[in-house]
Image (spheres, rainbow, N blue to C red):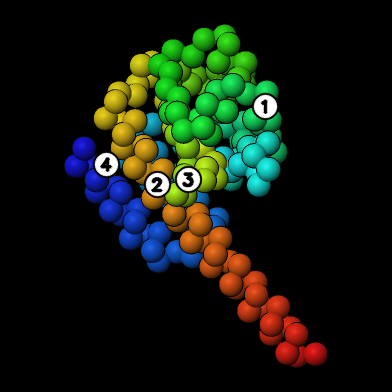
Amino acid sequence: MNSQLSSLYTMTQSILSTQHLKQVLDLVTSELAEAMQVQGTSVKFLDPQGRELRYGASFGLPERLTRESVIEVDKSAFNRRIIEGEPFVTGRMNEREMFQFGEDLSAAGIQSVLFVPLRIEDRVIGILGAYCKKPDRFKEEEVEFFRLAAGLVAIAVENARAYEAVENLNAERSRFMLR
């Protein structure tokens, strides 16, 4: 637990000094994979209509799993439950879950997964995931730690998006002033 708290502290310090979304996502996915001692982590973003999830970043996962991967929420009972606020944990992925998460997880030897919502106040912006090759990997303490981390990640994402929006407005204003 001390190493996890230390990782959260390091992640918080780094997030506060990093404003760009890609940097934030790369940092949190790598830090969380190390803190949780798992094969990989991911951040999936929910589109504004709440219909699709797309990978924003991942660490330690096969690129073919995350590249251009779109998950239709209406066709995904697991992801719908997570978006509604319920964590999803499994320690021995069965055939039904493999269908849900793809054959690429099986090919990568992933047995345990943990997903929690990324929530800003009462709004879900995506899903944070952890993946491990060991069966029955995630216990209640780790689920709680991951929920806390997800809160931090969601705030970091919103701050980075706001920073980039201000940067874009400033660039537009500069272009306008030069005309």
Q: Which residue is mark 1?
A: 74
Residue at 59 percent of width and 43 percent of height: 45
Task: Say which quadrant the C terminus sits in.
Answer: bottom right
The alpha-carbon separation of the residues under discs 3 and 1 comes to: 20 Å
Identify residue for label 3: 122
Front of the two marks 4 and 2: 2
Q: Is residue 49 left or right of residue 109?
A: right
Q: Nearer the viewer, residue 66 or 151?
A: 151
Q: Which residue is mark 2?
A: 151
Nearer mark to the viewer, of 3 and 1: 3
- Residue 58, how many percent across, how many down? 53, 41
Q: Quadrant of the N terminus?
A: top left
Secondary element at tag 1: helix
Amino acid identity at mark 1: Asp
Q: Is residue 134 above or below residue 123?
A: above
Residue 4 shows which numbered tag? Answer: 4
Front tag of 3 and 2: 3
- Looking at marks 3 and 4 on the same chain, the residue that comes earlier in the sequence is marked by 4
Q: Nearer the viewer, residue 86 or 53?
A: 86
Of mark 1 and mark 4, the one earlier in the sequence is 4
Q: Quadrant of residue 100?
A: top right
Within the image, what quadrant is residue 177 found in? bottom right
**Helix, strand or loop at mark 4:** helix
Q: Residue at x 63, y 79 (%)?
A: 170
Q: Amino acid at mark 3?
A: Asp
Category of crowding for the residue at label 3, using alpha-carbon neighbours closer than 10 angstroms: few (below 14), some (14–19), many (at least 20): few
| Three-letter code, disc 4 | Gln
Q: Look at the numbered discs 3 and 2 and tell me whether their residues touch, using CB distance below 8 Å.
A: no
